[in-house]
Amino acid sequence: MLFIALCAAFGACATGGSKSSSSDEFIMDLDSPQIIVGEFEAQLVGGLLGIGSLKRETMTVLYFPLEDVVAVRFRADFMTYHQFWSRSGRQAFISALERYNQDYDARRLTSSRTSRRSYGVVQGHLIWQQFDFAVQASAGMGVELGYDFRDRAPYFTTYQREAVYKDPGTSAFDRVSQNIPMFFTRAQAAELAALFDQNNLRELSTGLPTGTGGVARDDDY
């Protein structure tokens, strides 16, 4: 269910990040005004380090209207992740899902080592943190679009590749994120595609202030 709510994110730690060579590179700040767009479900691999069976999780979608960027917020391996998608990345997700549905209907899906990137790779940004007062790591990363089989059943997938954070003050605070695949049924992927829809995001942000004044804060998160 879509709903409109304004919030700003937890954690006031300064952010930094490593850069990549992608022309689509961007950085984000969790203090920027944001809108809670809605929630969706997907499967993550249960257990530490991606070892285990699939476990259904509920994730939150946030929209940052000043940057026209969407974040998928979720918990995994005792970390809170904000996985950021640019407009071009969101369109790539929607296009990849369309291709997956065509391949699914035509029974062209085959299990392989490269199927998780069958529909391309997009440049994203990642902010991750264990708890409120821990180091808030921030860096660019790639997200592979494709599919994978589990128990002989195909799933549409996004594969968040590792991000490398280099702390500007001391290497003691450097961090490397985990590789995290998300597994979607077709219905679940369609829900996220609807939350990524640009027309919907534009309607949600109509009339919002252009600065931070008047934006409610989600201090309890």
Image (cartoon, grey):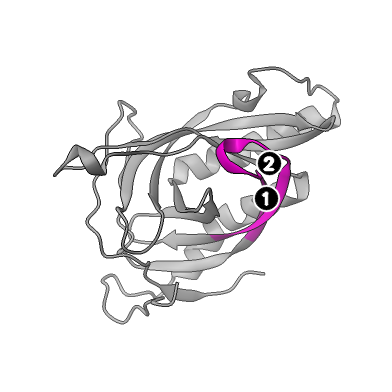
The prevailing secondary structure element of the residues shown in magenta is strand
> What residue is shown with label 2?
183
Q: Which residues are magenta?
A: 40-60
Closer to us: 200 or 131: 131
Callout 2: few (<14), some (14-19), or many (20+) C-alpha neighbours within 10 Å? many
Q: Compared to 153, does 210 lie above or below? A: below
Magenta span contains residue 52 = yes
Q: CA distance from mark 2 to mark 1?
A: 6 Å
**What is the three-letter code of the residue carrying label 1?**
Ala
Q: Which residue is mark 1?
A: 42
As drawn, the label of residue 123 is none
Q: Residue at x 66, y 55 (%)?
A: 57
Task: State whether residue 187 is above or below residue 171.
Answer: below
The quarter of the image holding the C terminus is bottom left
Q: Nearer the viewer, residue 141 or 3?
A: 141
Q: Position of residue 186 (x, y in %)?
A: 76, 44
Identify which residue, 218 or 71, lies in the foreground.
218
SS at mark 2 in the image: strand
Who comes first in sequence, dot 2 or dot 1? 1
* Residue 114 falls in image quadrant: top right
Residue 1 horizontal/vertical position (percent) = 67, 69
Query: Residue placed at 53% from the left, 55% from the top?
Result: 75
Q: Are marks 2 and 1 in contact (CB under 8 Å)?
A: yes
